[in-house]
Image: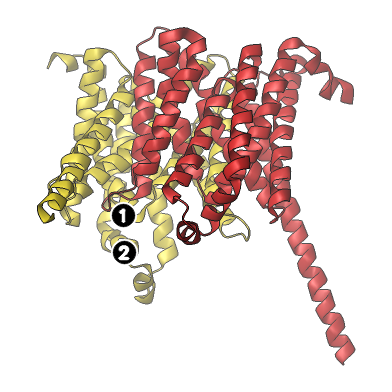
Chain colours: A yellow, B red
């Protein structure tokens, strides 16, 4: 394909395929556990970490990961205090993280250009090192999910059952949250902090409309994630629009089509079903 | 010193206009955030701040800066309706649906902006606002929205409160809960529209949550809650503007004004958190002492 004749475009292709697949796998757990708002806050909380790392000349992934993990712990601690309500705590931390990132960046010159790269990604600028990080995170997350997948699924559906069987439920939660955080961080170069939540939630939510079986759902989510990455990248190259946004639009478009037309759980089939009864 | 810190900056006309805008938004955010926090609409508000973004872009592309408010208003009403009817599919939980709607709409905005040559500058202006360049007409627009929202809340505030605490009772009393939900979503959306030029779409979320979340840490009484929330909202706007002016004029440090206002709000939240924690600890100690006195008396 002539779209991918340049080296940078081929690197971008590999990156979006890797990120799409990784987000698909992790998204299954986010959707089953209803962690979408939490993932959203993670993506925003990571932002000042990225800016700080860039200002101090540290590794981007390290700064983002450490800062995100710290804020996640802060949220968990605030949740356990009396008189605080979960969603407003997440909202406060989310806006604080974002404002801090913007203020830090505005003190620098070259403000707007860097900012938009962090916010919506710049996949055509990924280097071989970024690919290695994404692949590394992918392998680590897959190993973790392969080792603990059964326990995590049990935790999603029956928390007290998990605890009764003697598993450390808290520790499993923290491991899952860290896996989500690692995925968010590795998706930043491709789709940016604001949009990475879409690539995590949309493929898995779409897959859930098509199947009841967990294994099928996971495979489908991986395929949909990679497909969104590929199609979005090609569209952005042909039309000349932001790649991150195009990828997200494809993922959301696939969801919208399935929401309407999926064979058993789509809106249209339920209408038909109701009409058949009446 | 206090004169230089708190009065001098606002003698400049553009700073005075920014202050007027910030104070209006503080009142508006302070009142509406009470609804957001009591109804736990934080995620819905976050979604609304993102779904208004494509409206801002389209309005700007079609009619320049004057079109921003109308584009934002159109998308605000559209997404308020969508968010009210959306959670109807059992297979898709509400939070997943919100996340997908939010990012999908937002991406439409980004795609439209990315077609322009001044891409990155435009994007940051839309996202983070430019409070220092608001003009008289925008202040009037904000004042009108504030008046409309306050009037709506004065009329249906009691019903919204009932819906927040006991949806079953609200339905049993014959109120249409769906309609009340729609009103709440529209009110939140109007705040986003009013604030979009000044603090941008992404930071409005702070105005919609932080004031009441801070007030909630200090009091459980509704009237006090509203008063403290408005105070936090206006004080945050004032302190944030003063701080960003000081930093850039006297210390050569450029701080984005909108984001500094948000950080001032968050700082007030932290103060409220500490005060609340100390008061609770004090209350516990008094109770312990009273108990010890009673035990001593009995002995």
Q: Which residue is mark 2?
A: A157
With respect to residue B214, does A154 lie above or below? below
**Outermost residue to the bottom:** B299
Could you say which quadrant of the image residue B211 lies in? top right
Question: Where in the figure is residue B15, as x and y percent of width and height?
Answer: 73, 16
**Outermost residue to the left:** A276
Disc ID at residue B298: none
Q: Nearer the viewer, residue B201 or B221?
A: B221
Residue in the picture at 47% in, 24% down: B73
Asked whether the beta carbons under mark 1 and mark 2 sit within 8 Å of each other, the answer is yes
Q: Nearer the viewer, residue B40 or A213?
A: B40
Could you say which quadrant of the image residue B294 lies in? bottom right
Q: Residues within 10 Å of mark 2 (few under 14, many from 20)?
A: few
With respect to residue B249, does B100 lie above or below? below
Q: Total marks drawn?
A: 2
Residue in the picture at 43% in, 41% down: A40
The subunit carrying tag 2 is: A
């Amino acid at each position: 394909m002539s779209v991918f004749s340049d080296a940078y475009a081929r690197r971008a292709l590999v990156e979006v395929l890797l990120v799409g697949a990784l987000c698909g796998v992790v998204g299954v757990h986010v959707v089953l556990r209803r962690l979408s708002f939490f993932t959203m806050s993670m993506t925003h909380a990571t932002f000042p970490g990225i800016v700080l790392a860039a200002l101090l000349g540290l590794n981007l992934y390290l700064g983002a990961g450490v800062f995100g993990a710290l804020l996640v712990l802060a949220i968990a601690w605030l949740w356990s205090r009396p008189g605080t309500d979960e969603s407003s705590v997440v909202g406060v931390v989310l806006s604080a993280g974002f404002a801090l990132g913007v203020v830090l960046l505005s003190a620098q010159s070259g403000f707007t250009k860097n900012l938009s790269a962090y916010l919506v990604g710049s996949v055509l600028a990924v280097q071989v090192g970024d690919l290695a990080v994404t692949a590394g995170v992918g392998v680590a997350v897959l190993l973790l999910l392969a080792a603990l997948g059964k326990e995590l699924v049990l935790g999603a559906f029956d928390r007290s059952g998990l605890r009764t069987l003697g598993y450390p439920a808290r520790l499993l939660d923290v491991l899952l949250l860290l896996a989500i955080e690692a995925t968010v961080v590795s998706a930043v170069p491709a789709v940016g902090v604001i949009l990475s939540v879409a690539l995590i939630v949309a493929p898995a939510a779409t897959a859930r409309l098509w199947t009841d079986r967990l294994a099928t759902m996971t495979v489908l989510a991986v395929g949909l994630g990679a497909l969104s990455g590929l199609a979005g990248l090609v569209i952005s190259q042909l039309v000349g629009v932001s790649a991150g946004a195009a990828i997200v639009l494809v993922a959301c478009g696939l969801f919208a089509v399935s929401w309407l037309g999926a064979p058993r759980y789509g809106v249209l089939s339920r209408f038909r079903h109701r009409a058949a009864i009446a | 010193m206090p004169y230089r810190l708190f009065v001098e900056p606002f003698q400049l006309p553009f700073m005075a206009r920014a202050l007027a805008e910030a104070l209006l938004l503080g009142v508006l955010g302070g009142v509406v955030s009470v609804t957001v926090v009591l109804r736990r609409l934080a995620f819905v508000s976050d979604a609304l701040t993102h779904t208004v973004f494509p409206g801002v872009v389209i309005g700007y592309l079609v009619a320049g800066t004057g079109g921003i408010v109308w584009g934002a208003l159109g998308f605000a009403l559209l997404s308020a309706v969508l968010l009210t009817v959306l959670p109807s599919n059992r297979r898709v939980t509400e939070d997943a649906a919100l996340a997908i709607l939010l990012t999908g709409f937002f991406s439409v905005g980004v795609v439209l902006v990315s077609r322009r040559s001044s891409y990155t500058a435009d994007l940051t202006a839309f996202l983070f606002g430019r409070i220092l360049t608001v003009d008289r007409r925008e202040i009037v627009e904000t004042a009108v929205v504030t008046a409309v929202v306050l009037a709506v809340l004065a009329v249906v505030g009691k019903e919204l409160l009932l819906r927040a605490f006991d949806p079953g009772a609200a339905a049993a009393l014959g109120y249409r809960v769906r309609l009340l939900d729609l009103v709440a979503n529209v009110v939140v959306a109007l705040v986003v529209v009013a604030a979009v030029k000044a603090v941008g779409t992404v930071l409005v979320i702070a105005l919609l949550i932080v004031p009441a979340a801070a007030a909630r840490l200090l009091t459980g009484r509704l009237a006090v809650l509203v008063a403290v929330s408005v105070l936090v909202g206006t004080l945050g706007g004032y302190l944030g503007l003063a701080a960003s002016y000081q930093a850039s004029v006297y210390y050569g440090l450029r701080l984005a004004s909108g984001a500094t206002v948000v950080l001032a709000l968050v700082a007030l939240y932290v103060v409220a958190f500490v005060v609340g924690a100390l008061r609770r600890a004090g209350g516990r100690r008094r109770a312990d002492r009273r108990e010890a006195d009673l035990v001593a008396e009995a002995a």
